[in-house]
Amino acid sequence: MIICTFEDRGKSSLRHVVVGCLVLSKSKDRILLIKRALNVSSRPNKYAFPGGYMDRDEDTKQTALRELKEETGYEGRIIELFRIKDNPDRPHEDRQNVDFIYLVEVLNKVGEHDDEIAEVKWFGLNQVPLESEWAFDHFEDLQLYKKHQKKPFNLPIIGKNRL
């Protein structure tokens, strides 16, 4: 939570904005996952989509592409907004936030991952780690994406899941 002081000197706890990238290969048959380093405070040694907190003066698309580059060393191209999760009680989440998930096509490898990441790895859509090995609720996002691939529905998905 973010504690803010307003013009009337009132204080309030506000939610963070986070952005994740469901990164697809050019052929769209593989996804890029990161494995969180042991030194991170939340969900260490678990797989997740690249992503993180939005910085001041960024929009969510800029955040997505910055976090992708920082956490994987890849540049990407936003395909579309896939999902907005605003559930205040997201599973496996120790901070209250609003999460934007973008579908992103990978472009060029331009660097290395940062120290929050232990591993960057490509997986076939049906050869991903077990659900227990995932951070946050990103496994659910992947299942929803696979459902969308089989029978497309309107995007973005806002609010509760559609599984």
Image: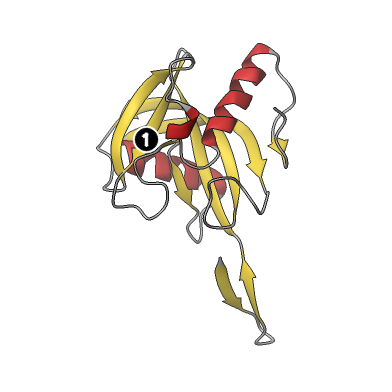
Describe the element under mark 1 as helix, strand or loop: strand
> At 40% from the left edge and 39% from the top edge, which residue is drawn?
68
Report if residue 42 is visible in the image. Answer: yes
Residue 86, given in percent of the width and then of the height, sits at 67, 49
Most extreme residue toward the front, as rendered? 132
Depth check: give the residue in front, 101 or 163. 163
Q: Amino acid at mark 1?
A: Ile
Residue 100, given in percent of the width and then of the height, sits at 59, 43
Image quarter in which the C terminus is found: top right
How many neighbours does mark 1 have within 10 angstroms: few (below 14), some (14-19), or many (20 or more)?
many
In the image: residue 126, left or right of residue 73: right
> At 55% from the left edge and 39% from the top edge, which residue is drawn?
137
In the image: residue 93, left or right of residue 127: right
Residue 145 location, quadrant: top right
Depth check: give the residue in front, 36 or 71. 36
Identify residue for label 1.
34
Residue 3 location, quadrant: bottom right
Image quarter in which the N terminus is found: bottom right
Query: From what the image shows, is residue 108 above or below residue 71?
Result: above
